[in-house]
Amino acid sequence: MNPTASDVTSTPAFRLRCINCGNVADHAEQDFRCPNCGDLFEVFYPRWDASRGAGASGPDLQSLKQLWRDRKTSLAQADTSGVWRFRELLPALKPGYEPITLQEGNTPLFDLPRCARSAGVDALQAKHQGMNPTASFKDTGMTTAASFARQENFHWVACASTGNTSASMAAYAARGGMRSLVLIPEGKISWGKLSQSLDYGAVTCQLRTDFDGCVRVLNDLVRRKPIYLLNSVNPYRLEGQKTAAIELLEQLSWDPPDHLIVPGGNLGNSSALGKALIEMRDLGLISRLPKLSVIQAEGANPFFRSIREHGGKQLIPTEADTLATAIRIGNPASWKKAQRVLEATQGTVEQVSEVEIAIAKAEIGSDGVGCEPASAVTLAGLKKLARQAFVKKNERIILVLTGHVLKDPEFTLKFHRGDLFTGSAHEKEASTMVDQQRAPLVLEANTESVIRVLDEFDAKKLT
Ligand code: F0G
């Protein structure tokens, strides 16, 4: 049976299914774990399963694409959201419930010509999820999951975070009239992210542990108190995060690229984007799957090691350490989901060094785009994948940039001043960064000294 517009334009009935034992449920416990085996749930849409494999692309799907396009000019609240605009592919709220939205999604796709040259590929584009309302991709999942929290009448929502989830959760909880509790590792998140959660009114606890320690405390807490868990084990988060891939394909006129390259931390985002690609392929919205590849920092590489050393069959938690603090995660919750995405899309996993991340971040900046350190692993990883010929020079490649450059200005300033790695094991390798460094210049307050600087730069023919 081919999927028809009415299959997908009518409100989709959805259920939860355990990714390990297949247990199906309509409601999850507060820890979002399968009561049978303890693994994660995913949202699935039984009606689509009935039409799986049909591969139809007839006029019905065309009218769905038209409907999504038309909503761009609508002023209705759900239509102004780049997430809820695609609500036919999302779990529906009950009648009478409105989504909590900050008009998330609707993020730009940028060309990165300088980065393309540096990676040795003909062309390169970035889907910039840092252009969301709280400046990271988390908003696309928070609008869905926070809306479900409110529908279920929770007074408190909570997350453990490396900084972006907490900033996003705090904002959406505030908009939705709920209280929020943030657990973050003390001293290991950027000031920008911490200040957001304070400003949006979260109760913010800096625990003397790492991210993985914060997750442990939170998991215990939600079993003892009526608190709604907003980490990415919550399957409604991933449904919202799916829409970045749907929106991307719409921006590409539904012509799939060859590669999507994504940073990997807790591995919720790669799982979500992969789920979207597979669902779009199964529904017939796209004709083939792009390869989705995940890049980790060398100091926080449990998924890289899982795939390379254990064939993706098991994951051994590591002690994580990287200046890309957003992905400083040693025990990623969604590794099994991400492993399945790599397998389904024929993507791969790579790891990159601290210095490679820093250089890549400055290069993305030099294209006038910018991003936070964790997002820059994508370009650093692409360079490696291009050298290995896993990515071919003439292929169409999209980097998913996950956070805005202003999320971590301390990293950027230290990089340009040249003291990012002072006293660290990476100090020697850091000499390779000088070409990208643009330290601020302190001058006497006269025109002559400024002109001298301009002349020096012209003489060096710097671009
Ligand atoms: N990039 C940024 C900017 C992030 O904040 C995160 C995760 C990732 C990439 C990795 O995404 O975890 O889905 O694999 N940040 C989480 C947080 C963990 O708490 O803000 P992932």
Image (tube, rainbow, N blue to C red):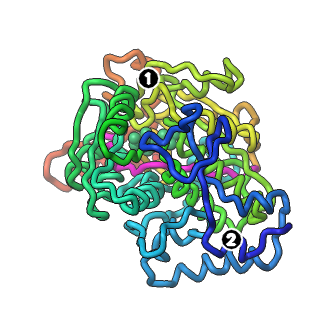
- Where residue 301 appears, as percent x and y from the top left, is 54, 25
Residue 177 found in image quarter: bottom left
Q: Is residue 405 magenta?
A: yes
User: In the rendered structure, which segment of residues is drawn in magenta?
Assistant: 395-413
Residues marked 1 and 2 touching at CB (< 8 Å): no
Does mark 1 have its CB less than 8 Å from ligand 1? no
Q: Name the residue under label 2.
A: 8
- Where residue 374 appears, as percent x and y from the top left, is 46, 39
Residue that extends furthest to the left in the rendered view of this protein = 445
Q: Name the residue under label 1.
A: 320
Q: How crowded is mark 2: few (under 14 residues within 10 Å), some or many (20 or more)?
A: many
Element class at badge 1: loop
Horizontal side of residue 344 vs 354, given as left or right? right
The amino acid on which the numbered mark 2 sits, given as a three-letter code, is Val
Q: Residue at x 48, y 34 (%)?
A: 357
- Cα–Cα span, label 1 and label 2: 42 Å
Element class at badge 2: helix
- The correct choice, above or below, for 183 with respect to 139 in the image is above
